Image (cartoon, rainbow, N blue to C red):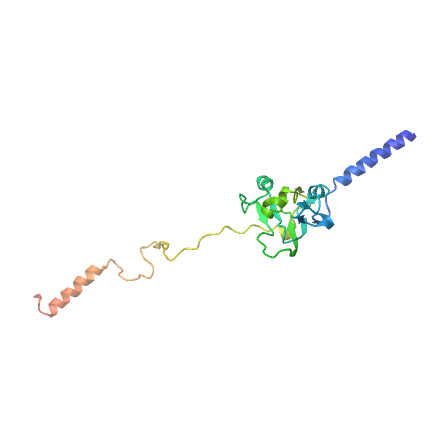
Amino acid sequence: MRRATILHLAIIAVLITAATSQAPPIRYINHTVGDNAGWFFNSTTNTTAANYSSWAASQTFNLGDYLIFRTSSNQTVIQTYNLTTFKNCSIDHSSDNDTVVYNGGNTVFDQALTIPVPLTIQGPNYFFSDANDGIQCQYGLAFEINVNRGLGLPPSLNQPPPPPYREPPGPDSASPPITIPAGGKGLGNDGFKNGLSVHVIACAVLFALLAVNGGIGVVFS
């Protein structure tokens, strides 16, 4: 009896652990990269302030979460979905569709920065610093994560893409053709009805002028 009770308790504990580990998240989370160490690199010793791969392995990331980079202008924050870009520690052959630079080209040295990065793409996400011609990345200022669906994107991050841009018509573009409605009547043209034409009217006027000036003999019977 006692052994059966222990077995039942063990099974219940396993089921509770499994249910807890698979429970969906109940809120979005801000993850501070590197915890208290932040996102820093010592250029003198070529060392990072933390082991960022180990830090990432200890976290669970979902859509709608944010990564908070507490850093300075001495480092950059690159987010990419391109594994080749990540392995090369360079954005030279990346595209706007797969890579985002959050702190590139800053000209103020050692300026404190806090950079929030939303997680909006499910699956592998890669992060690195390309400062010092990629040396920071090569010496460990880089990590990769896997983003789960979780609660899905919140409305603030789930906006539809803008409509595709269309070039407005230029001044030399052709005007649309005018459609003549049924009945033979054009736009604003109500004259010359009942078969009369410009040629007939012109001949009549010329004939009258000649008759007045005596150019034609008119005989009345």
Find residue 189 and report its horizontal and vertical position in percent: 31, 61
Q: Quadrant of residue 107?
A: bottom right
Q: Can you give x and y, in whole percent of width and height, for residue 72 in the image? A: 65, 54
Residue closer to the observer: 193 or 132: 132
Nearest the viewer among 23 and 79 is 79
In this rendering, the answer to whether 150 lies above or below 105 is above
Q: Position of residue 218 (x, y in %)?
A: 9, 66
Q: Residue at x 59, y 49 (%)?
A: 101
Q: Residue at x 92, y 31 (%)?
A: 2
Q: Is residue 202 left or right of residue 150?
A: left
Taking 212 as reference, is 12 left or right? right
- The residue closer to the viewer here, 221 or 83, is 83
Which residue in the rendered view is the most extreme toward the front? 44
Q: Quadrant of the C terminus?
A: bottom left
At 76% across and 40% down in the image, what residue appears?
A: 21
Q: Residue furthest right?
A: 2
Q: Residue furthest bottom?
A: 212
Q: Is residue 64 visible?
A: no
Residue 50 position (above or below residue 13): below
Q: Position of residue 85 (x, y in %)?
A: 57, 42
Q: Name the residue at 17% across, 65% down.
A: 205
Q: Dividing the image into 4 quarters, which one contains the N terminus?
A: top right
Image quadrant in which you'd find residue 112? bottom right
Q: Would you say residue 136 is visible in this rendering?
A: yes
Give the vertical position of 88 relative to 106 (above or below): above
- The image shows a total of numbered marks equal to 0
Image-based side of 1 in relation to 127, left or right: right
